[in-house]
Amino acid sequence: MAKYDYVPSPFMSNPIVKWVDHRLPIFEMVDQQLIKYPAPRNLNYWWNFGSLAGVMLVVMILSGIFLAMNYQPSTVAAFDSVERIMRDVNYGWLLRYMHMNGASMFFVVVYIHIARGLYYGSYKAPREILWWLGLLIFLAMMATAFMGYVLPWGQMSFWGATVITNLFSAIPLVGKSIVTWLWGGFSVDNPTLNRFFALHYLLPFVIAGLVLLHLWALHVHGSNNPLGIDAKGPQDKIPFHPYYTVKDAFGLSVFLIIYAYFVFFNPYMLGDPDNWIPANPLVTPPHIVPEWYFLPFYAILRSVPDKLGGVTLMFGAIAILFVLPWLDTSRVRSGRFRPAFRVFFWLFMVVTVTLGWCGSQPPEGMALTIGQICTVLYFLHFLVFLPLLGWFERPLPLPASIAEPVLKSAAK
């Protein structure tokens, strides 16, 4: 953990707290690592999304546990059990809407969290392992969400599972064996649904473990900040509570209003209506698409006519993020001081959103061509643009400390 002068909070002098803490120092850990923990004094609201992701993880785990009590992982009963949850279980509709839309909200805050890290250089030394742990959380989220989408056993659930699992067959030598193992047989059927349900229930707890490691790694060197420079002393830091707990509480309030809109007023906006039709292996939907948060990677997959090439690029789109700390050759972390980088960063954001649109369209005509162009630009950003920018870009002068611009702004 980070080294600093720790002064216990007044509640630590309570006799009961002292008695418990002497035997299990949990109160001291909370006080030291959450309440009194020194954070950079200039964090803005973009730093709220990490805590929002943690809140959504708790919401998803709790709502998922109660849904699992009433769900039946059987191809015969799965669709009807979901309908029973909606109609007969007390507040079952609320639990399902919270869980269903919570997945989308979870990905929204995580995507913004990743984009903030990309803009402010939070992946650079000495936070490479912190970045890797975040990417592992993202991969576990994707696996959990995919398996959860299969559980209602609607048309898009069945055919989405069939298409995505079949992608592994492109792997030379072992691909077909992997697909057979995933299916538990020779087609998507009851064994597939059972193992997907088991893994969907298990993986959130794996994510929770990764989150603890992520927080541990974060507290070793502390948070990055909008200036991208290291804290020089006590003048650059403030206690996490009450300054950032209040800020997080305000951000959470705004977020919950948006979340509540989808849960209570527009719960089906982010879903596919075909999934309200029971799964039928004999009827293929005219246009099979995954959930919106997979669409950019789906567009990359379809941009290559060769199956193995498409699968390689799709997984490569995430794998390339693991080597990002070495692809970005600039010594300056924050995009605030890199004018040319800001242009390419926002171009990359436009490319990613466009890929999402291309993934939602049939793989033909203009949408396919645009998707292929954006796929090339996606990889060029990491493999060409970022390394060249680090060599040729002239960043703006960095402030001497975090406190310097903060105090100047306060003086004005």
Image (cartoon, helix red, strand yellow):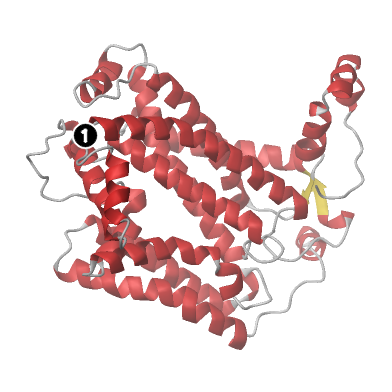
**312, 92: nearer the viewer:** 312
Q: Quadrant of residue 225?
A: bottom right
- Residue sitting at the far bottom: 392
- 357 relative to 246 in the view: left or right: left
Quarter-wise, where is residue 195 in the image? top left
Q: Nearer the viewer, residue 344 or 16?
A: 16
Residue type, mark 1 in image: Asp
Q: Residue furthest left?
A: 282
Q: Is residue 119 left or right of residue 140?
A: right
* SS at circle 1: loop
Please tell me whether residue 27 is drawn above or below residue 364 in the rendered image.
above
* Residue 9 x, y percent position in the rendering: 87, 31
In the rendered image, is residue 251 in sight?
no
State the residue at coordinates (37%, 15%).
91
Give whichever of 332, 266 is nearer the camera. Answer: 332
For the point 30% across and 69% down, which residue is it? 309
**Residue 287 picture location, percent across and down:** 15, 51
Residue 56 visible (yes or no): yes
Residue 314 position within the rendered picture, expressed as x and y whole percent measured from the top left: 35, 62
**In-image side of 45 versus 358 (left or right):** right
Quick one: 260 or 28, which is closer to the camera?
28
How many badges with numbers are in the image? 1
* Residue under label 1: 189
For image coordinates 24% across by 38% down, the residue present is 185
Residue 89 percent location from the top left of the image:
33, 12
Count neighbours of disc 1 (C-alpha within 10 A) and say few if under 14, some if 14 to 19, many if 20 or more: some
Q: Residue at x 51, y 64 (%)?
A: 321
Q: Identify the image quadrant of the C terminus.
A: bottom right
